Each structure stands twice: as structure tokens, then as C-alpha cells.
Image (cartoon, grey):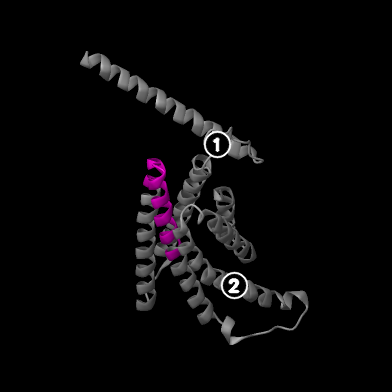
Amino acid sequence: MGFGILFLSYFLAFFVPLSYLKVIGYAGIAWSLGKLKDYRPAFTRAVWWLIPLGVCCLYHVIGSVLALLPHMGMASIELPVFGKLVTAIVSMLECALTLCFHFVLLRELRGFALELELPAIVKKADWGLWLVGVQASTYIVALALEIAGFGLQLLSLIAFLLQFVWAIFNLINLFGCYMYICPEGDEDMERRPSRFGFVNDMRQKMDERDKLAREREAALRERKKKKKK
């Protein structure tokens, strides 16, 4: 359906600290959302935010290449557009675009899960949206303190930790989508093993947990029936 590629591309885009791999990650996310639009056309709204994100990422790639030229024995090229001020502005813009992208993606993911009656994914999407708001508030406060000239070490650390936790949370939710949302007509097909061993292990653990939860729920309903009698 597209959630497998979305999961892997999201990991590249938001967990690998290399700009050129982020570009590949953004492209993979756009491709997977293009496949998912066949099931929910509104997913394309998230794709539009990836275009300026990709441009910002390419800016950082070019800047990194120019910075490496002197170390490669080549003449240094200094362009005003890659100065510290412009780089800082692009970085702040990238943070804002990332928040907007996640807000749209999680909102549409929530709507899709509601249509499919998957409350666990809906709940995780709600938490993700709440974390988007917290992260946005943290960035706004940090920017205000920066303008006022106050130190930002502690707040910057908090913002970094929030972003890391938030990204892990979203990655887990996308993995849940990959696990439990399949194309129409494939509901009764046997699930094919993944090429990645850790994915198969996670699937097995989640299946065992869900089976135990269903057994407990069935036992609870049975006890309630006996009490009524």
C-alpha cells in the first residue's frame, strides 16, 4: 500500500543526520504518499510541504559541499547566500516546515484510521498532533529568547529531546500502519515475512500482545455474562 516505504523513508528523513540522505527520505515519503492518495486523496496535502523542505535540504547539501572544497585542495568559494545569517534563517524555516508537514500528515493519518476503525492508530495520531503543538511552542519561546538575548542552552536541549521523542513516536505509529493497514482485498491473505529480521520480531511480539488482549477481553465478557445469570 505504501506504508512500508513511508516507514523507511521517514527514518531516513528524520533520523539520519546527513542532508543528502534526507533528500532521498523526502522523495520516498512523497512517493509513498502518492500511492496512499488512491485510498485517501487528502494525503497529497502533506506532499506539498515536502517540496520546500527538500529545497531547504538541498541548500544544506550545497553548503556542505562548498565547505569541503578547501579540504579537498580546491579553491574556497564563499557566497553570501551561504553565510551564517542566511543559514540560520533557512534552518528556522526548515523547522517550521517540518512542523507543518507533520501536522498535515498526522491529521490525515488520523482521518484514515477513523475510516478504517483503528482506534489505537487514531489515539497515537492524537498524541502526535499534541506533540506538534508542544514542539511549536518550544520553538517560539526559543526564538523569542534568542531575540531578547537570553541564553538558550537548556531550552535548546529540551527542544532537541522533544523532537527526538516526537520522531520516535511517529515512527512507531507508521510501523503500526504498516502492520495493520493493508490494501482492500488483502485482509485474509497470509502476511509475507519481511526481509528485515527485526520487523518480523516486532510483528510477532505485537501479534502475541494483541492475542493476549483479545483473550482477556473475551474472558471479561464471559465473566460479565455469568454475573448477569
- The prevailing secondary structure element of the residues shown in magenta is helix
Seen in the picture, residue 145 relative to 119 is either above or below; the reply is below
Is 107 inside the magenta-drawn segment?
Answer: yes
Which residue sits at x=64%, y=65%? Answer: 20
Q: Name the residue under label 1.
A: 202
Seen in the picture, residue 159 relative to 6 is either above or below; the reply is below
Which residue sits at x=47%, y=47%? Answer: 173
Residue 89 point in image, percent of width and height: 48, 77
Q: In which quarter of the image is residue 222?
A: top left
Q: Name the residue under label 2.
A: 60
Is 209 inside the magenta-drawn segment?
Answer: no
Looking at numbered disc 1 in the image, what kind of residue is underneath it? Met
Neighbour tally class for label 2: few under 14, some 14-19, many 20 plus, Cα within 10 Å: some
Residue 29 point in image, percent of width and height: 56, 58
Left or right, residue 161 beside residue 144: right
193 and 186: which is toward the camera: 186
Over which residues does the magenta segment extend? 100-123
